[in-house]
Amino acid sequence: MEHFELCIVGAGVVGLALAERFARTRPRSYSILLLERNHSFGQETSSRNSEVIHAGLYYTPGSLKARLCVEGRHLLYQYCQQHDIPYRRTGKYLVARQDELQGLERVFDTAAKNGVDDLQWVSRRTLREQEPLVEASHALFSPSTGIVDSHGFMDSLLTSAQRAGVQYAPLTKTIAIQARNGYFDVQTECGAPGHIEPFTFRCRHLINAAGLHAQELAMRVEGLDKVFVPPLYLSRGCYFSLTGKPPFRHLIYPVPEQNQRGLGIHATLDLAGQIRFGPDVEYIDSIDYRVPEDRRALFVEAIRRYFPSLRADQLHPDYAGIRPKLCGPDGGVADFMVQDEGVHGVPGLVQLFGIESPGLTASLALARLVADDGALQA
């Protein structure tokens, strides 16, 4: 049976960041295996998002989301500069109508508590000068917010990890895990349909970074008390693209929803300057990436609150992403969940649950937390 020091299950942006961090901070003899069930890395939540580098404005002070977003933002900009990853500090305007001023004030206070010290109040006149087509009574400007080529970022992480010795195995589904005597025996199936072969190996440490499938994987760990597996709620967010000349030069966000289910349907730019709107929030029972045509009316109504000249025929269904939430449709806020032996009692096992937004921004900081400060630092 082959033996590895560490197995990471899931090659989304977090799994890739973990692989790169461990490979860079451990001796070459520390063997690492990275498993991915899909044909390529980052095919799910990691590539179906807004590609925004978040500043850290919204998250509960003292939470992992707040801490790792702010720390991860600095690390991500630094990484992009060092590795020539396309990105842009676009900045974003957070806009509100007269009756939404208290919502903006809450965001400003939360951001300050999270260590975001560059958020600025801007006048209506300044907003109109910068974004003539945006209608709002009040606005905040976040100069630290930006966009990144998420695929380029993930590709760079994988390349760096492989150069440092990480073995990467796509099209590999984890079937069963037995925790015994300080090791994990892992059973997998490898290959495309019609060409599947079994592969079993042993590892000393295992990280569950399976994203949407993290709970499913955790239920397959023999020796783990399933009381430590939290419920999973699938939240689909759809995006609509805008035809015609881009109307904005910055990202435009409304005041966050009061029930904190989402950040509101906002306008984001891609690196080519094209505009897309989203995501909305819709809880679903199973993974489904379709963009229902009937969501268009909801989008038009929400967008016209700050972009009144929008025509409905300018919007076209684009794509959808699904967030692995730990809170259901009744609202509430759940933090990132990082479980190690101190939580569940299984030596060598780290499980990551609920890694939704701002997971892309926080990925490098989360990897550093697990690799340098967590149970697997040895």
Image (tube, rainbow, N blue to C red):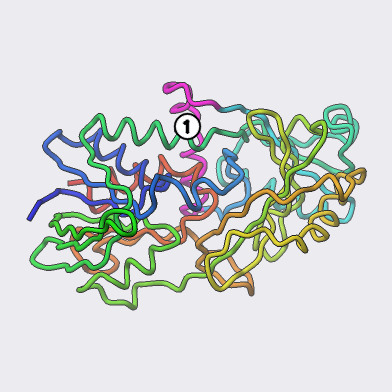
Above or below, 89 against 108 in this view is above
Q: Is residue 187 magenta?
A: no
Q: Does 212 sit left or right of 161 as displayed?
A: right
Q: Magenta segment range? A: 62-86
Looking at the image, which residue is at 57% across and 64% down?
A: 288
Looking at the image, residue 215 lies above or below residue 53: below
Q: Is residue 63 magenta?
A: yes
| Pointer 1 residue | 152
Q: Position of residue 22 (x, y in %)?
A: 26, 40
Seen from the viewer's position, the closer of residues 307 and 195 is 195
Q: Please, what secondary structure does the residue beneath circle 1 have? A: helix
The x, y position of residue 229, in whole percent, is 37, 72
* Residue 79 horizontal/vertical position (percent): 43, 28
Magenta span dominant secondary structure:
helix
Q: Position of residue 153 (x, y in %)?
A: 46, 33
Q: Residue furthest front?
A: 194
Q: Amino acid at mark 1?
A: Gly
Q: Could you say which quadrant of the image residue 210 lies in?
A: bottom left
